């Protein structure tokens, strides 16, 4: 059966009329910024202080797009007679985001919480080489990492927070001025003060005289 002339136009207009009344799901980016969920995988931030250069992330990355260089340094013994230790010092940490497939394996395997997801995604470049982010840039991304979600009510305080608070308390105690003991100070000053001889004041005034008297025999001898 041949279609009725103009039926396609009528169907199209019906669709248009239906969708005109519905709420739009598109956003006019970049004029309207998207409201992204906090766990969005935008870019990876590096918290360098936590990185021990264990190389786990670079080994596990399926795309081999993490580049790490390091060297060893010897740390002197902390106590006399102790052994020297060696530690890895980070020289380079870079991620090539032109190869990264945002699988998150590097973040999952890092045993020292040195890598984090940031929801930032506006780092498109015209030169593909600029998509390799070096350690300074990866550190800058850390400022955009959202805070972790709040703990459940009644949950145990994380051991990291407990340790950090104990360390802060210990440092504060070390930096605080020593508590003064007024009585002890007073006793020390009293002990240093010359004791006055008991008796009348004449004996005190006579003391210099007696000293001059003692010098007299010498003078007499010289004469
Ligand atoms: S997210 Fe995946 S592909 Fe990207 S750097 Fe990490 S491990 Fe490699
Ligand atoms: S796994 Fe973590 S600690 Fe180890 S090298 Fe990678 S970022 Fe550093």
Image (cartoon, rainbow, N blue to C red):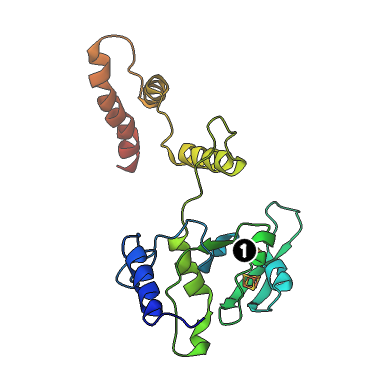
Is the residue indicated by label 1 positioned so its CB lies within 8 Å of ligand 2? yes
Residue shown at 41% from the left, 36% from the top: 177
Residue 95 found in image quarter: bottom right
- Expressed as whole percent of the image width and height from the top left, the position of residue 149 reads 50, 46
Front residue of 187/152: it is 152
| Residue furthest front as drawn | 1
- Relative height, residue 73 to residue 152 (above, below): below
- Relative height, residue 111 to residue 98 (above, below): above
Front residue of 17/122: it is 17
Within 10 Å of disc 1 (Cα), the crowding (few <14, some 14-19, many 20+) is some
- Expressed as whole percent of the image width and height from the top left, the position of residue 223 reads 29, 42
The quarter of the picture showing ligand 1: bottom right
Residue shown at 48% from the left, 36% from the top: 173
Front residue of 65/181: it is 65
Residue shown at 47% from the left, 67% from the top: 141
Front residue of 127/216: it is 127
Label 1 belongs to which residue?
51
Q: How many marks?
A: 1
Q: On the rendered structure, is 26 left or right of 205?
A: right
Residue shown at 43% from the left, 62% from the top: 144
Residue 104 found in image quarter: bottom right
Q: On the rendered structure, is 72 left or right of 126?
A: right
- Expressed as whole percent of the image width and height from the top left, the position of residue 7 reads 39, 77
């Amino acid at each position: 059966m041949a279609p009725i002339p103009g039926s396609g136009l009528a169907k199209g207009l019906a669709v248009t009329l239906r969708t005109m009344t519905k709420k739009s799901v598109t956003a006019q980016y970049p004029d309207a910024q998207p409201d992204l969920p906090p766990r969005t995988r935008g870019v990876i931030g590096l918290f360098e202080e936590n990185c021990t250069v264990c190389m786990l992330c670079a080994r596990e990355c399926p795309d081999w797009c993490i580049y790490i260089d390091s060297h060893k340094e010897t740390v002197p013994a902390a106590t006399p007679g102790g052994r020297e230790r060696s530690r890895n010092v980070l020289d380079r940490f870079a991620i090539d985001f032109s190869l990264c497939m945002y699988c998150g394996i590097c973040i999952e395997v890092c045993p020292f919480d040195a890598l984090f997801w940031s929801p930032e995604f506006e780092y498109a470049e015209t030169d593909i080489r600029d998509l390799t982010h070096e350690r300074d840039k990866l550190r800058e991304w850390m400022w955009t990492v959202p805070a972790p979600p709040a703990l459940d009510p009644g949950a145990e305080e994380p051991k990291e927070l407990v340790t950090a608070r104990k360390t802060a308390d210990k440092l504060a105690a070390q930096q605080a001025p020593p508590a003064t003991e007024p009585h002890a100070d007073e006793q020390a000053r009293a002990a240093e003060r010359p004791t006055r001889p008991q008796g009348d004041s004449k004996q005190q005034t006579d003391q210099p005289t007696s000293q001059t008297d003692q010098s007299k025999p010498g003078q007499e001898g010289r004469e």
